[in-house]
Structure formats: C-alpha cells, structure tokens
Amino acid sequence: MSEAKILPTRAEVPEALTWNLELIYPTEQDWENDLKIVKEMTTTVRQFAGKVGQSATNLYDVLVQAHDTFRKLEKLYVYASMKSNQDNANNHYQGLLARVSSLAAKIQADIAFMEPEIIAITDEQLTTFVQDEPRLHEYSHYLENLRLKKDHILDAQTEALLSGAAEIFDASSQTFSVLSDSDLEFPYVEDENGDTVQLSNGLYGALIESTDRAVRQDAFAALYSVYDQFQNTLAQTLTGNVKSHNFMATAHHYPNARTAAMAADNIPESVYDTLVEQVNAHLPLLHRYVALRKQLLGVAELHMYDMYVPLTGEPPLNYTYDEAKVEARKALAVLGEDYLSHVDEIFNNRYIDVVESKGKTSGAYSGGAYDTAPYELLNWQDSVNSLYTLVHETGHSVHSWYTRHNQPYQYGDYPIFLAEIASTTNENLLTEYLLQTQTDPQVRAYLLNYYLDGFKGTVFRQTQFAEFEHFIHTADAAGEPLTADVLDDYYGDLNARYYGPAVAEDPEIALEWSRIPHFYYNYYVYQYATGFAAASTLSQLMLTNGQPAVNRYLDFLKSGSSDYALNTMKKAGLDMTQPDYLEAAFAVFEKRLNELESLIKKD
C-alpha cells in the first residue's frame, strides 16, 4: 500500500514560499501599539458628532480624521486576517482577527454620525463650504457620490445601531468560512499515481482535471459526501447571510438586496439583467461545447466530474512556481516596462504565500491595505491553472499598486466591478501569448480547450451562480424558506439547464451551492462574467492598437474610485452599458471552438 501524502503544517513550509507579513508589522507588539492608537483616534473623531455641518473646517477635519482612522484600522485588519488565513486552526491569530473585527464594528458605530450629518448639509451650504475651504476639493467626488445616496443613509443613531451589529450580520459568513476551511475533514483518495492523498478543496481542483476517470469520479464523490453530511447546517449559514443582506437593503430603503448591492458602485441593474439575458441566449454554444466534450471523451454518459479534464489528453504544459513567474512576465510584456517592474516587485519580495498547507484558506486572492504591499494568497499546484491564477491575482495586485500610488486614501481602492476586469485582462493576455508562441497542434488544442473551459467557468458558470444568488435573495424576501431541499432542487435544475442534455444527472452537483464561498459576498459573482467579457475587448484593443490603448488601460488602473466605474471604463474605451462587449466575447468563444473542432478533425 502506498504511503499517504498529507498537507504540510505551516511550520513545515519553506520561508521563501510564505508571505512576509513583518513588512506590515515587524513584531506583534507593533500591531498592539497601532490597535491602541486607533482606539484613541476614534475618540477624536467622535468629538465632531453634531458639529459636522457647523463649518467648512469641521467638515474637512472630520473627513481627514475619519479616513486616517479607517486607514490605520484597515492595516490592522489586513494583518490579522492574513495571519489567520495562513492557518485557520491557529487560535491565537483567530483571536487577533476577532479583536480587530470587534474594534472595527465599534468604530463603524462611533463614526456612523458622519455621513448622515454630511447628508443633512444643504446643497447651497455645501457649495459655500467648498468655496471657503479649498481643501474640500480633494473630497469632491466622495461628497458627490455620498449625496447621491442620501435617500438611503439613515439618521446617525440608526446607522450607529446597524454598524454596531456588523459582527452579528457577518456571523453566518464567518461560520461557513471556519467550517469549510478548518473543521471539515475530507477523506483520503488515490491520485493518478496510485498514491493515497488527503482530499482538500485545493487538491480537488487538480484531481477533477485528472485524465484518469476513476480518480475524477472518486474525488467528486468523496468531496460531496462531506458536504452532504452538513448540507442542513450550510443551508442555515447561507440563509442567515441572505437574510442579513435583505434586512440591510430594506433598512436603507432599497427595494431589494440587488439594488442595494449594485448601488454601492453606481451600476444599474440592467447590466446584471443584460448579462443573464445574453448568456441564456448563447447557451446553445455551451451545449455544443459540452456535446463535443462527450464525443471526444468517448463516454456513454458525460458526468459533471468529466467537465474539467482536458479534451486533448495529458496536459502538455505544466509549470513549477518559478517557471510560471517567467512565463507570466513574458505574457504581460505588452503592458510595458513600468507594469513589469511592479510584477517583479511582487514576485521577488515575498509578497506571495505560495503553497497549500494544513488549515490554510483555500482558493486564491490578492489582498493588502493602502499602506502595505499588494499581497497574494495561492494554493499552488504545478499546472496551467495555477499559472493562470498567478497572472489573475497579479492583475489585482498591480492594479492595487497603481491605485494606491496615484490616488489619495479616499480614492485608493476600486470597486469590485473594475477589479475583475484588471485580473481577467491579464488572463486574456496570457491566452493570447500562449496561442502566439505554441505551434504544436496538440499544444494548441490543449490551450484552446483550456480557454474554452476558462470561458465556461468564468462567463457561463459565474452567470449561473448569479442566477442562483438572485433566486436565494428573492425567495427569502418573498418568505420562502431556504431549506437544503429547496436549494438542492433549484440548483440542480439550474445546472441542468446550463449544461444541456448531453450531461447525465449527477445528484451530487445539486449540493454545489453548499461549498461556494462567493455566495456569501452579496451580489459579487456577476462581476466575474462582466469582467471577463470586458477584459476580452480590452486585451484585443491593446494587442491591436498598441501603446495608445495600453496608456488608456494604465490610466484605468491608476483611477481607483476617483470616478464612477462605468465612466472609468468609458475612458478606457469600453461602454459597458451596451451588450456589444458580451456579444464580442461570445464571438471569440465560438471562433476558438471552431478552431478546436478543426484541429481535432485533422488529428
């Protein structure tokens, strides 16, 4: 019997493959010192309660001091959160995160008076304030954006009450995270080499792509057997999260949770509806691809565990982490030397936590704060998929670098709607680079298949998620209980509609909702799909039009939240209020599907 392979503990991971959080706080005592300072800063801000609208100086000073407080709080939170993410079973770091989360809720409550008092200032008075205090021009977009939401900001006492309950509203999401990433024990399965390995969310992503069908099937069954045991609990955590979204939307006088969520970035709901309509109109393309998959795999029945294996046999391209960094740099060269200099900084200074380890948060993300490096969490596997993940998260990270170095703190972040465009543009550039440099028909077929799978997973799948997310919010708002059976039935039917008649019915896939962390993010997932489609257009513009298009793209990366998201994209050369960018993306999908079919026929 082969020896079991288990995940390394945090202490067993080589230091070079871990992120260096000492760049944020050299010692934990430094963190404690800042925590104390932030508590004192909050007291200073509180002194403006009831006085914000008394003078231009008061308005300016409260804005500066409140943002300074949030700026330092953000740094504290990011440190504790990343420390916790590297080992969710470490109770000490869970404690740090709990302490700063509790402080954040208190600060939100203490400073909740500010926005209602700004809203209470009349337009005429605000104009006078800006004339009297020119430094308020630094906050002009912030103030304009805030006052657009004046019908949805409550009185100071109510906002303080809601802010003080933030930990309660987040409890379901936190429970899901700890349960999924730490407490669930997954069984052992065999990999392609016959080695016994302990299943994890990260390893599952590699096993489900195995060319050994038995490996895929066993991993699929083993993973969902665990979630099946806890589906009633997970239905409750998801329900609690949805109820908090619906409650907050109602409390702030929005007609529904989707309106509230999208209003935060001033994105009209028509963008969401257009996405769903366009994707549903193009489902025949997905059905055609799925039918091709069934044909090429030569199976009597195509199952959901067959949806990720490369159609062209053994993956001809695999990369170690060091090899992937070299390829990523080549793929992103079209963005210019300045962009590459920031890629090098991220790759060479331990900003990335690379390998999977016991208790580590699954998946990948780019994080950090305004005053930190743009850190990345990965769970590396030597695969093309991990190369794409590296390029994707580095897209976020360089976007963060440009924003934080070109915008003041109040505009030093960007809406999620824009974030996914920056990351998936990098993915599209990687695809173009690989297709331009790989001439072997087998390799090209693999890359085309990989692109089609990526499109399937990002545009079709994330829109499927968006439909499910809208269902659970509207169902709860209508008083329908979100039991595990209700969620299973809806998700199972939705999955069948998306993938079409070529896929056999797998009862396990109806449980997929129970393991998706993004369902806790409040109307987040649709932006993956819109972002991918927009990125497809932007990457083609840069590859076709050269430096002028690159310059417009870099200006977009530097914009942060200094303008509304749709305006920022228009300046970059893209109007996302129209369906054209989606239709163009589906045209690329069809073109590459045609090429894959052609290559396979010649083989």
Image (cartoon, rainbow, N blue to C red):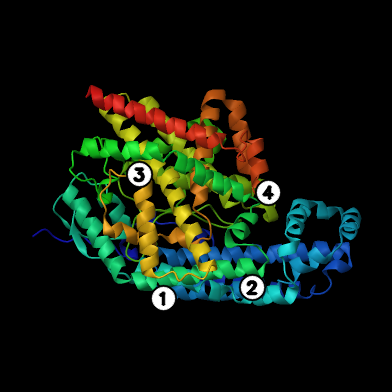
- Is residue 125 toward the left or the right of residue 164 in the image? right
> Disc 3 versus disc 4: distance between alpha carbons?
33 Å
Residue ID for mark 2: 163
Quadrant of the rendered image containing residue 296: top left
Q: Residue furthest left?
A: 1
**Residue kind at label 3, given as amino acid type:** Asn
Q: First in sequence: mark 3 or mark 4?
A: 3
- Which mark is in front, 4 or 2? 2
Q: What crowding class fits label 3: few (fewer than 14 Cα within 10 Å), some (14-19), or many (20 or more)?
A: some
Tell me the number on the disc at residue 91: 1
> Disc 1 versus disc 3: distance between alpha carbons?
32 Å
The answer to whether the residue labelled 1 contacts the one labelled 3, judged by CB atoms less than 8 Å apart, is no
| Vertical arrangement, residue 295 with respect to residue 132, above or below | above
Residue ID for mark 3: 385
**Residue kind at label 1, given as amino acid type:** Asn
Q: First in sequence: mark 1 or mark 4?
A: 1
> Disc 1 versus disc 4: distance between alpha carbons?
37 Å
**Residue kind at label 2, given as amino acid type:** Ser
Tell me where residue 496 appears, x and y as whole percent: 34, 50
Q: First in sequence: mark 1 or mark 3?
A: 1
- Is residue 568 toward the left or the right of residue 479 in the image? right
| Vertical arrangement, residue 443 with respect to residue 409, above or below | above
The answer to whether the residue labelled 3 contacts the one labelled 2, judged by CB atoms less than 8 Å apart, is no
Tell me the number on the disc at residue 407: 4
Quadrant of the rendered image containing residue 71: bottom right
- Which mark is in front, 1 or 2? 2
Q: Is residue 60 visible?
A: yes
The answer to whether the residue labelled 1 contacts the one labelled 4, judged by CB atoms less than 8 Å apart, is no
